[in-house]
Image: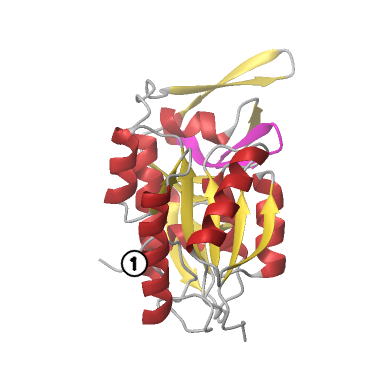
Amino acid sequence: MTSPTPRALIAEDEPILAAALAHALRRLWPELDIVATCANGVEALQQGLALRPDILFLDIKMPGKTGLEAAEELAEQWTEGLPFPHIVFVTAYDEYALAAFEHAAADYVLKPVNDARLGKTVERLQQRLRDGSGGSDGRSGSAAATPATPAAPAGEDNLVRLLAQLQAMVPPAPRLQMIRAAVGNSVRMIAMADVVYFEALDKYINVVCRDSEALIRTSLKELLPQLDPQQFWQIHRGTIVNASAIATAVRDEAGKLSLTLRQHPAQLRVSPLYAHLFRQM
């Protein structure tokens, strides 16, 4: 059972901005308990899981992990049944980008911190806590600005829409027609239709085909914009699957979703944030 006093975590890699946000929050919301200030996304993930705050103020661009990556991993690792924190993204994006946040129903604080805008955020959060939409009273559900636990798919949809909106602001890269993978002294040409799934392995990606595998030196973040989104679906922060290779989506007794594949023995875990892809039509 969480404390009736709302608890918040701030993740901001610029100490002056972190201190300014904390100072403004203490002035505008004296009852708020700021339990931690983190300097990067990795620390935000660790402290978020350890302290279970009611509210997270996450900078978008941080070393180690971005605020979006930290939010996604928190949602994946959050204890089922516990209300997920309300998330406010801290951003220096321009008005076009802010419109994407609004469309995705995610709250934000624009850098540098502005008391008038932050005051509206505080009022919004206080109302959501009073309404029981997640937060410090241990009540289930999530705010419109937050990703959610598996029990609240609407919140997950909000984070998924936010990620999609931010990705849409990046000019599309040319679609890959072929994967070129080094195998010894030769270069293997892999047709996209032959790929079953991509799996992140440290600094490499494992390209898994029906009867073979090959490594390419890139990241999923760099690869994803080059793939046809109708053909290749991200199902986890470390996995992209060829939709045509999916046989079934199976939910176990704990509510976790996994995929079985056609003509391949692997079973792939689906993050709660991408479970909406497999809802019955």
In the current view of this chain or complex, which residue is farthest to the top?
Answer: 185
Q: Going 42% across and 45% down the picture, which residue do you hit? A: 114
Residue 175: x and y in percent read: 38, 24
Q: Secondary structure at mark 1?
A: loop
Residue 166: x and y in percent read: 38, 39
- Residue 122 is drawn in which quadrant? bottom left
Q: Is residue 221 magenta?
A: no
Q: Going 54% across and 81% down the picture, which residue do you hit? A: 81
Q: Which residue is under mark 1?
A: 279
Q: Going 39% across and 54% down the picture, which residue do you hit? A: 107
- Residue 187 is drawn in which quadrant? top right
In the current view of this chain or complex, which residue is farthest to the front?
Answer: 27
Residue 98: x and y in percent read: 33, 41
Badge 1: residue crowd in 10 Å (few <14, some 14–19, many ≥20): few
Judge by depth and name the residue closer to the eye, 237 or 29: 29
Judge by depth and name the residue closer to the eye, 226 or 197: 226
Residue 256: x and y in percent read: 54, 71
Region of the chain picked out in magenta, as a range: 194-211
Q: Main secondary structure of the magenta part?
A: strand
User: On the rendered image, what quadrant is the C terminus found in?
Assistant: bottom left
Whether residue 209 is visible here, answered yes or no, is yes
- Residue 215 is drawn in which quadrant? top right
> Amino acid under label 1?
Arg
Judge by depth and name the residue closer to the eye, 123 or 143: 123
